[in-house]
Image (spheres, helix red, strand yellow):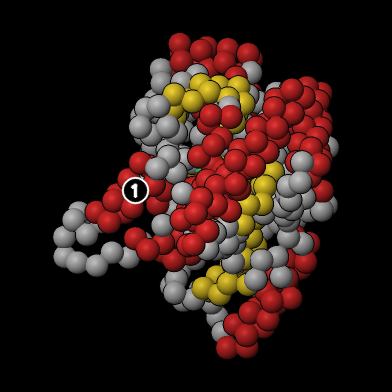
Amino acid sequence: MRDFRYPRGTGLQDRIEGFYKWQNLRRNQGLWPFSRSTDEGPSTVCAARDDSGQKIHGVNFASQDYLSLSSHPEIKKVAQQVIEVFGVHSAGSAALVGNTSHSVLLERKIAEFCGMPEAILFPTGWAAGYGVIKGLVRSGDHIVMDALAHTCLQEGANAATKNIYLFRHNQVAECRKWLEKIRAKDVENGIMVVTEGLFSMDSDTPDIVGLQELCHEFNATLVVDVAHDMGCLGEDGRGHIGMQGMLGKVDLIMGSFSKTFGSNGGFVACRNREVKEYLRFYSPPCTFSNALSPMQAATVLKAFEIIESDEGRQLREKMMANILSLRAQLVEAGFEVYGDPSAIVCVKMGSEALARLVARRLPEQGLIANLVEFPAVPKGQARFRMQVMANHTPQNIADAVARLKAAYDQGFAEFEWMNQEPEALQATA
Ligand SMILES: Cc1ncc(COP(=O)(O)O)c(C=O)c1O
């Protein structure tokens, strides 16, 4: 994928043809497992289609609906009621008249949930990640960022300043070194330190306490992207910020509704009204993009209500029991899994060629799982990202592991065959 990122030539639409050719080469060999669509929503077992329209059907571990709230009856009911009253569109930016009574309440709810005084909504989580950086950081400022931070954070950083320093994944000591270096030369400009509460490809977590302390020491501002852990991890759903006792103590929290809250949308929770108002008018994806639809705001509000209830606690427990069971069964089947228990269960494949051959076999086995390969992860570290939902049943999990194992065995046999010495290949052809 990276080979096509910087095409050369004057014709902006011609010079990118190489990507489509390469994609088609893979597509024609059944090796393009991306851009799929579901026929019936992100349920635990579902019908879907590949991007050539071929039907696939199987247990679904590829959707981001961790607490299974996207199909929760109460949430569907709220959506229908709100559409009756408000229609389907916000019809304006939140800086003008795009907010609704639901989004105003939602901002209050998020602030309270995060233990922060204020929160502001963004049209997506991506917009929130990009927007919190672009909104606050200027060209003379500095950004010190975990090397594996999500693309929305990286793009926001690139758009805001050239002064970007990456520290090795979760290495607080290396972050300190950058801060020391920057402050030794510059005591006039701002520094933003950027990390995630739970990393989306490795399922691991930084020392948020340590990073926030560093920020206090060096007069920097910490941003934590909680897209994958807020709402679904921790006894009370406050994610790793809650589990590390940092509720209300992190400078800026940025999140998404697209993993746990059954909707599109994102937010930034902040320390005061000044920051909120500034972002509303100086963060382009907030100021110049239409606000969440009334239905999205109302359903996310309902999702928060469920997440804070006994039912929410039970859903988190169910999800975690599923995660632990999936991880244990994968290991028993001979696979390695990454990181700590979370809704993201990444299964190590290693070689891209092997991973693609296994991915080719998954649809016929009846498993829908996402292949992740370079450059989303380093070369030679391809993996399947399985995403767990509270509504997955023990049978779904057992099926998923058995089907992945069958696909792996077939893919591995093909991989071995292809990697034989040329003479041996000729003999077996
Ligand atoms: C860590 C992280 N941040 C932000 C986002 C963007 O969220 P959204 O899907 O709401 O745009 C994602 C989703 O891919 C993510 O994984």
- Residue at 66% x, 47% y: name it: 346
Foreground of the two, 422 or 332: 422
- Residue at 70% x, 32% y: name it: 402
Q: Quadrant of the N terminus?
A: bottom left
The percent coordinates of residue 342 (x first, y second) are 73, 43
Foreground of the two, 252 or 318: 318
- For residue 187, side relative to residue 264 (left or right): right
The percent coordinates of residue 273 (x first, y second) are 58, 49
* Tag 1 secondary structure: helix
Foreground of the two, 197 or 85: 197
The percent coordinates of residue 258 (x first, y second) are 56, 36
Amino acid residing under circle 1: Leu
Q: Residue furthest bottom?
A: 185
- For residue 314, side relative to residue 71 (left or right): right
Foreground of the two, 228 or 345: 345
Is residue 34 placed above or below 276 in the rendered structure? Answer: above
Looking at the image, can residue 158 be seen? yes
Looking at the image, can residue 373 be seen? no
Q: Residue furthest left?
A: 11
Q: Quadrant of residue 144?
A: bottom right
The percent coordinates of residue 125 (x first, y second) are 52, 44
Q: Quadrant of residue 92?
A: top left
- According to the picture, the residue beneath numbered tag 1 turns out to be 25
- Residue at 16% x, 60% y: name it: 11
How many other residues sit within 10 Å of disc 1, few (<14), some (14-19) or many (≥20)? few
